[in-house]
Image (tube, coloured by chain):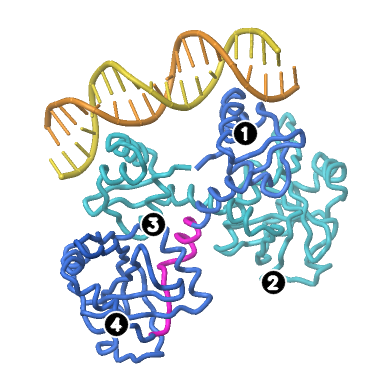
Chain colours: A cyan, B blue, C orange, D yellow
Amino acid sequence: MDEILLFLLKKGAKDSAVKISTKDLGKLLCMSQQTASKKLIDLEIEGKITRTKTGIMITNTGLEELREVYSNLKGAFEGGKLKITGKIVEGLGEGGFYVSLEGYQKQFKDKVGFETYPGTLNLKLKKEEMEKRFRLREIDPIIIEGWKTKSRSYGDIFLYKCRVENKPCALIIPVRTHHGFDILEIIAPFNVKDKLRKKNGDEITVEVM
Amino acid sequence: MDEILLFLLKKGAKDSAVKISTKDLGKLLCMSQQTASKKLIDLEIEGKITRTKTGIMITNTGLEELREVYSNLKGAFEGGKLKITGKIVEGLGEGGFYVSLEGYQKQFKDKVGFETYPGTLNLKLKKEEMEKRFRLREIDPIIIEGWKTKSRSYGDIFLYKCRVENKPCALIIPVRTHHGFDILEIIAPFNVKDKLRKKNGDEITVEVM
DNA sequence: ATTACTAGGAATCGAGTAG
DNA sequence: TCTACTCGATTCCTAGTAA
């Protein structure tokens, strides 16, 4: 991770413009004025910072990079199992169609150990939960392989074994997902809403294994 | 910060040995097997990791480095501004004597922008606030330089610009402090107790800029 | 299979300096 | 003052390969 970006964050460049000369920046980070200048130019080209007369600010792109590192460190140091909480929302029914295809079902049975109820549960994450999605990347997914027919292709799916209220389920993330980062799709060997007596709008927590 | 160290942390090398070949490590971090090998050697020489037959583990030295970055990121993302709350206690009057010396006063004016009321406010921190003192270390202090006379020497002072009830003030920490970690000393361009109508025993919060 | 050495090409750094 | 360019020095990376 970039040490200049971290330094700027410390200085508050997340919320307000930070004024610092390349000379001072170099001195503080043990590099020459020239190198500091060059690195700022590069960060600007990469879109991670912007520079104006009032000073330097970190862009959303830059913050995202820092936030991902933060998420990783937090996961490691604060530890515990990853739990993601979201609100049940109505899907379009298409997820259910796909997962019930024999090409996927067979792999679910082989690799996860259950045949799934022919439908998916869509979970909408709150803003503060979305950061946890990055932590999923630290976990090696089970890969459900796609296939092709003459007419169309079915993509790979990343799958993470989970539990909801101590019952087995799985998070599935199509590699080429059509959802934003705020929606998670869950499959289970049963109808989650019926079995757990939940309805749209209720919150549930899945614990990633 | 070292990306290999971060990767190993993600893989759990903080608690147990992680087994990974230099080839795979290189592939995962977009570098050659040779570079991964070299970097592991360097990390081992620096004492940040240890390698055994069972795999790689991060040492305390390595964890310290990661923890520092974590602390910085946490401060920036979770913290908002650092606010320290304490109870006003009676000082010995000596702080007031020192800060009113011309050698210090001149620097206050030059570097902080105000001449201070000839007295310091002593703040006693509660146990749970004391941890915040460590976060001060992440902030670069303004350094008020000491000097020597024939008879004695006056030491350097670390100074942090602050606000109390939205009015300017400053935290001062003599480099060779005589206070414990539970006492903070504050200067301001006015008599804090009079202006803010506080008395000994009242609590105030200073917001570090 | 694995790790790590060498050699030379690529990238980075910083002194000098212009704008 | 400041930033950022050039260019020679240095460091870093990787292909080849040995162990």
Do pointers 4 and 1 mark residues of a single chain? Answer: yes
SS of the residue at dot 3? loop
Chain that bears disc 1: B
Instruction: Indicate whether residue B209 is drawn in magenta.
Output: no
Q: Residue at x 37, y 64 (%)?
A: B176
Q: For the residue marked with disc 3, what is the amino acid?
A: Lys
SS of the residue at dot 2? loop
Mark 2 and mark 4 residues within 8 Å of each other at the beta carbon: no
Can you tell which mark lies on residue B93? 4
- Choose between B178 and B86: the one closer to the eye: B178
Do pointers 3 and 2 mark residues of a single chain? Answer: yes
Task: Tell me the residue that label 3 is attached to.
Answer: A14
Q: Nearer the viewer, mark 2 or mark 1?
A: 1
Q: Residue at x 40, y 67 (%)?
A: B81
Q: For the residue marked with disc 4, what is the amino acid?
A: Gly
CA–CA distance in space, label 4 to label 1: 61 Å
Mark 4 and mark 1 residues within 8 Å of each other at the beta carbon: no
Chain that bears disc 2: A
Task: Tell me the residue that label 2 is attached to.
Answer: A202
Q: Position of residue A108 (x, y in %)?
A: 83, 45
